Image (cartoon, rainbow, N blue to C red):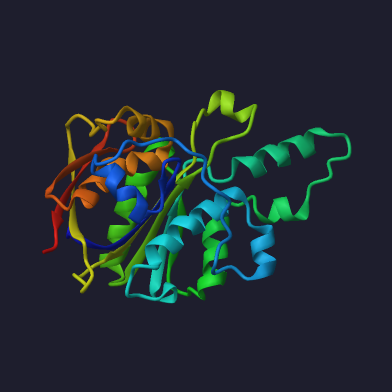
Amino acid sequence: MKPVFVESVGLAAPGLEGWVAAQPVLRGERSCVLQELPAYQPGLLPPNERRRATAAVRLAFRVAEDAVSRSEFAPAELAGVFTSSEADTGILHRLCTALADEARAVSPTDFHNSVHNAAAGYWSIAASAKLPSVSLSAYDASFAAGLIEAATLAHGDDCKVLLVAYDIRPPEPLYATRPLAQPFGTALVLTPQRSARALASLEFAPVQADLSVMQDATLESLRCGNPAGRALPLLVRLALGEAGDAVLPGTGAQRWCVRVQPCD
């Protein structure tokens, strides 16, 4: 596959509050201490949509706005790829609970937010984004699937792409069967050609190799505990500014090697 270039990064997880603050932790200069993320109010959303935004949508906006804030491109200039293993499990729980009740009174707002592309829809409203948008899911391989989709879209349509990967902690009883221990979100602004602010180029190849893991036990728990957290080995390479490979899980037994080459 042709390389794509990383223009900017967004990140939000316990102990990793924003890309700028997270870089010393990812470089191993500071230990990762799990701390609950404070509440977030999406800056781009109009008040009416902000009131309806769910936890999953707010997490997606948190990392998207973090990445776009350091990009030279306006949000409306970016195509979108939104990838999430489970999307909004809180909404799913409330809908199932309502349907199991005798009255079956489903909240219109919950129904409005129940679709998998809710975050992408809110973003298109907030950013006045009219370029192509894709929302997908690939279980634990959701980040790698989104990354490959974004790279393909960047070159196929010759456009700049905002990739957003996110998953929240499911409520009980869903958590018992899908134990995503912590919320995790990350975003990348990707371009088909090198921009003035490009951090690194990424090349992709399917491989048969061991997955990349984190040396820090807390970061490894974040990597294993959330499908979006599978991005951590790649994010470490970007934070270090060093060339190297990150092997990420694909679907089934598939593995993807992402080769990172910093832009000098």
Residue lying at 38% horizontally and 62% vertically, measured from the top left: 67
Q: Position of residue 253 (x, y in %)?
A: 28, 30
Work out whether residue 185 or residue 148 is closer to the camera in this orientation and state it.
Answer: 185
Q: Answer left or right for 53 relative to 13.
A: right
Work out whether residue 73 or residue 87 is closer to the camera in this orientation and state it.
Answer: 73
Q: In the picture, which quadrant includes the N terminus? A: bottom left
Residue lying at 32% horizontally and 27% vertically, measured from the top left: 217
Q: Which quadrant of the view contains residue 169?
A: top right
Residue 72 visible here: yes
Q: Position of residue 228 (x, y in %)?
A: 40, 43
Farthest residue to the front: give it.
30
Residue lying at 57% horizontally and 71% vertically, measured from the top left: 125
Farthest residue to the right: give it.
103
Q: Position of residue 38 (x, y in %)?
A: 55, 48
Work out whether residue 135 or residue 229 is closer to the camera in this orientation and state it.
Answer: 229
Farthest residue to the top: give it.
176
Compared with 261, 98 (above or below) is above
Residue 185 visible here: no
Q: Position of residue 236 (x, y in %)?
A: 25, 45
Q: How many numbered markers are drawn?
A: 0
Q: Answer left or right for 9 relative to 35.
A: left
Compared with 28, 65 (above or below) is below
